[in-house]
Amino acid sequence: MGFETNNEIHTDYPPHWHLIYRWPNHAGSPAPHIYLAPDGKMTENACYVDCAHGTHRDYSAGEWCPFVDPYGHDVCAIRINADGGMSITKPMSSIYTMSAYTPDVGVTIYKDDTLIGTIRTENDTDQGIFNVTWNSTGNLNFHGSYSETIEYNTLTGAILKIKR
């Protein structure tokens, strides 16, 4: 969303978003910063560790970034893909892959090699209105399509109202 890296409160540029696996008390939580190209495609991941200043690792496209719990056990892993999309998995599980966004389709989502649906979003960062539309293919029991509108504070990102 626009508040993530495009206002005076969040000053760590270039544009990126976070996918944080938050531990109790924050210290040690893996905090990936997913960087975006001007066309919106994801390019790389710089994973920092909360409360361990100066500690981070850069992950290139195609390289898995593991998330661990406070005891060091693998929880899941994310990967930026060469096409600008992203994949996520957990130990001994399927891989979910999101394509890079395109204006005509939005984002396509696959479970392993099977298309399960598309998601389109519209974000009015001036008004704080975010629309999400999910269209299921019906494959693999991912049935049903829906839309929702999320109203949020444009500076903090706090959700004010959700309408389905």
Image (cartoon, rainbow, N blue to C red):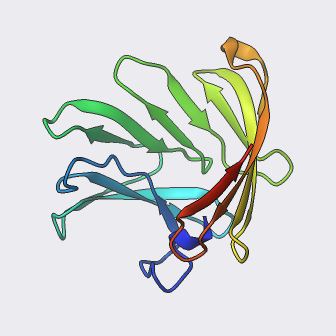
Residue, far left: 71
Q: How many marks?
A: 0
Q: Nearer the viewer, residue 47 or 26?
A: 26
Above or below for 136 versus 23: above
Residue, far right: 104
Q: Quadrant of the C terminus?
A: top right
Q: Quadrant of the N terminus?
A: bottom right
Q: Position of residue 111 (x, y in %)?
A: 60, 23
Residue 134 in sight here:
no
Residue 43 in sight here:
yes
Tell whether 156 sits left or right of 111: left
Q: Nearer the viewer, residue 152 or 49?
A: 152
Tell whether 111 sits left or right of 121: left
Q: Residue at x 33, y 46 (%)?
A: 21
Q: Residue at x 37, y 55 (%)?
A: 32
Q: Nearer the viewer, residue 156 or 91?
A: 156
Tell whether 17 sits left or right of 124: left
Q: Residue at x 36, y 17 (%)?
A: 92
Q: Position of residue 44 (x, y in %)?
A: 46, 57
Residue, far bottom: 8
Tell whether 93 sits left or right of 40: left
Q: Position of residue 29 (x, y in %)?
A: 24, 51
Above or below for 12 versus 130: below
Q: Residue at x 34, y 22 (%)?
A: 91
Residue, far top: 140
Above or below for 41 versus 109: below
